[in-house]
Image (cartoon, helix red, strand yellow):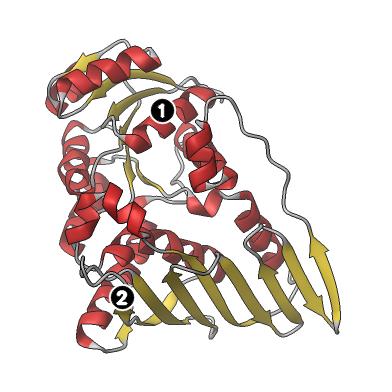
Amino acid sequence: MEKKLRIAVFGTGYWASLQVPSWIESGAEIVAVWNRTYEKAVAFANKFGIPNVYKTPEEVFEKAQFDIADIITDMDAHYPFVMMAAKYKKPVISQKPMSNKPEECLQMVDACEKSGVWFAMHENFRYRQSLHRVKDLLESGTIGKIFWAHIRMRSLTRSRLEGAPYLQTLDHSTIRNMGPHIFDVTRFFFGEAQTMYCPQTTTFPDYGTLDIALATMKMKSGALVQCELSTGLPPNIFISGEKGTLILDAGNNVIITRDGKEERLSAPKIVKPAYIPQESWEYHGGEGMLSIKSCIEDLSRAFIKNEPAKTNAKQYLSTMDLVFKAIKSCDDNKVYTLDY
């Protein structure tokens, strides 16, 4: 990067253990860390060579010298920490989802705008190489005007639920957990949505959490898009256009069919860098892990240029609106019009 950014990290959990080395690999310096359990923050600082550990988040904002606050905490902490960043007029990045309450999302964006604070979301799914390849093919008109599409991503597995107790009791857990990802990818590909209908169900009656969701959206472009969060079938994207069809299969290969002829583009070849743990590489997939660094580098470029990030919080309100409308649609069994 042109400038060595100084980052203050809030949270030292699993995702922080992946984002911090990605920041370092991107050329940034982690100068401060806070965690609600101080001893964990100290251990984290020792592991990653972070010079300053603070006992309260206020201390970080008042004493640490940094360029960006990176909020890598549980969802409930996003709102108070972003509001704190606005109060102290410090640029801030938040993990997804922005909040589980629509009014808090609006307040966070409003507070940062009034304080002149640069505010972006760490939404890394759209930075996967294969998804960028699909985006480029759509923008180049490879299959013409889009008529309809189906996007399938993995939902919550039993092992994932067992390893994350908070998801067991979270209402509409799969939409709140994976909805921001799949809806942001939908907007990345097809623009803004006009309507949302989203029935949900459970395959884990003992937990009762809604782990399966089928969201159908009418886009402002006129295209119909169905987003499926499910288990048992591999991730897949199918897009139908006036000139043909495009498939992104589970192996990240692209298959384009036009005029009865099939063209196959093999998945990008990727190699695991040393800073990514093998277990995470295998569990999330190589593209998923590499997308963290790609997202961070793009956020850094935007910040250095004093530009809104592609995933700036104001435009991300549209992604969160899709999440909240999907939840309302399930509860009320109604089609909802989007606010943004």
Q: Distance between the residues labelled 2 and 1?
A: 32 Å
What kind of element bears circle 2? helix
| Relative horizontal placement of residue 25, taking residue 246 as reference (left or right) | left
| Residue 225: x %, y % from top left | 51, 79
Picture quarter containing residue 149? bottom right
What kind of element bears circle 1? helix
Which residue lies under the disc numbered 1? 20
| Residue 192: x %, y % from top left | 45, 72
Pick whichever, 85 or 22, lies toward us.
22
The quarter of the rendered structure image containing the N terminus is: top right
Q: What's the amino acid at mark 2?
A: Ala
Q: What's the amino acid at mark 1?
A: Val
The quarter of the rendered structure image containing the C terminus is: bottom left
Can you tell which mark lies on residue 9?
none
Question: Vertically, is 126 above or below 66?
Answer: below
Pick whichever, 335 or 112, lies toward us.
335
Q: Is residue 50 visible?
A: no
Q: Say if mark 2 contacts mark 1, CB within 8 Å.
A: no
| Classed neighbour count for the residue bearing mark 2: other residues with Cα under 10 Å, few (<14), some (14–19), many (≥20) | many
Question: Vertically, is 321 above or below 29?
Answer: below
| Residue 10: x %, y % from top left | 26, 31
Q: Can residue 41 be seen in this view?
A: yes
Sequence-first disc among 2 and 1: 1
Question: Vertically, is 224 above or below 75?
Answer: below
Which residue lies under the disc numbered 2? 326
Query: Which residue is farthest front?
Result: 206
| Residue 176: x %, y % from top left | 29, 62
Residue at position x 54%, y 81% in the image = 221
Residue at position x 68%, y 71% in the image = 247
Question: How many numbered dots are placed on residues in this image?
Answer: 2
